[in-house]
Image (spheres, rainbow, N blue to C red):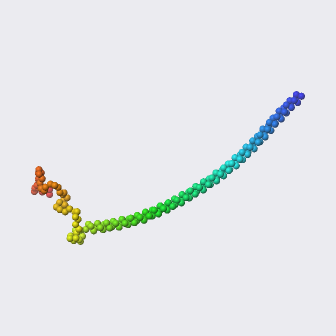
Amino acid sequence: MSKNKYNNDIYTMYEKELEKNQKITSKYNKLRWEVEELRYDNKKLNNELSNINSIKEKEINKEVEKITKTLIQKNQKLQEDLLKAYDEINRLKGIINNNIVDKDYLIDKLNNQVNKNSTNSGIPTSKEIVDRNKKTGVNTYNHRTTTSRKNGGQFNHKGSTLTKEKLEEKN
């Protein structure tokens, strides 16, 4: 009996352990299925997220293309305006240069007319234009200026005269 009882106890223990094992196995299977479902949901969400990101990237790229096109068009218009401005500047420079050449020619011609007198042209002396502001007189050839002093030797000033010897030394 004791052997039988011993076998029964082992068998009951075995059955208990088997039940525990079955419960744990069923829990494990349930958890495994949950993990698989979560993995599937995670993949699905990742795909949706990547689709959303790609859609957003496409929208952003479209906006960037729109902005870039408008900026390129504005840049081209500004370049055309700049070229027109350069053409206008060059045209005005040509006109100014022609005017300068014409004015220089006219100035030279008029100066040539004004600078002619009876000594360097065929104008007779009676037709010569006299400048009223030009000083004429005794001391214009040596550029002496008039002073308030009297002519001749000055008071308390020892004069000197040229002698024949001094003239010969200078020559």
Q: Is residue 155 left or right of residue 13?
A: left
**Image-quadrant location for residue 2:** top right
Q: Is residue 11 visible?
A: yes
Q: In the rendering, at what x and y percent does residue 168 appear?
A: 12, 57
Q: Who's the residue at 87% across and 29% down the image?
A: 5
Q: In the rendering, at what x and y percent does residue 107 appear?
A: 31, 66
Q: Is residue 159 above or below residue 90?
A: above
Q: Quadrant of the C terminus?
A: bottom left
Q: Is residue 125 left or right of residue 39?
A: left
Q: Quadrant of the N terminus?
A: top right
Q: Who's the residue at 23% across and 68% down the image?
A: 129
Q: Is residue 2 above or below residue 155?
A: above
Q: In the rendering, at what x and y percent does residue 111 appear?
A: 29, 66
Q: Is residue 96 left or right of residue 7?
A: left
**Image-quadrant location for residue 15:** top right
Q: Who's the residue at 68% across and 48% down the image?
A: 45
> Please, which residue is most extreme toward the right here?
1
**Image-quadrant location for residue 86:** bottom left
Q: In the rendering, at what x and y percent does residue 90 appear?
A: 43, 64
The number of discs equals 0
> Please, which residue is most extreme toward the top here?
2
Q: Who's the residue at 54% across and 60% down the image?
A: 73
Q: Is residue 166 visible?
A: no
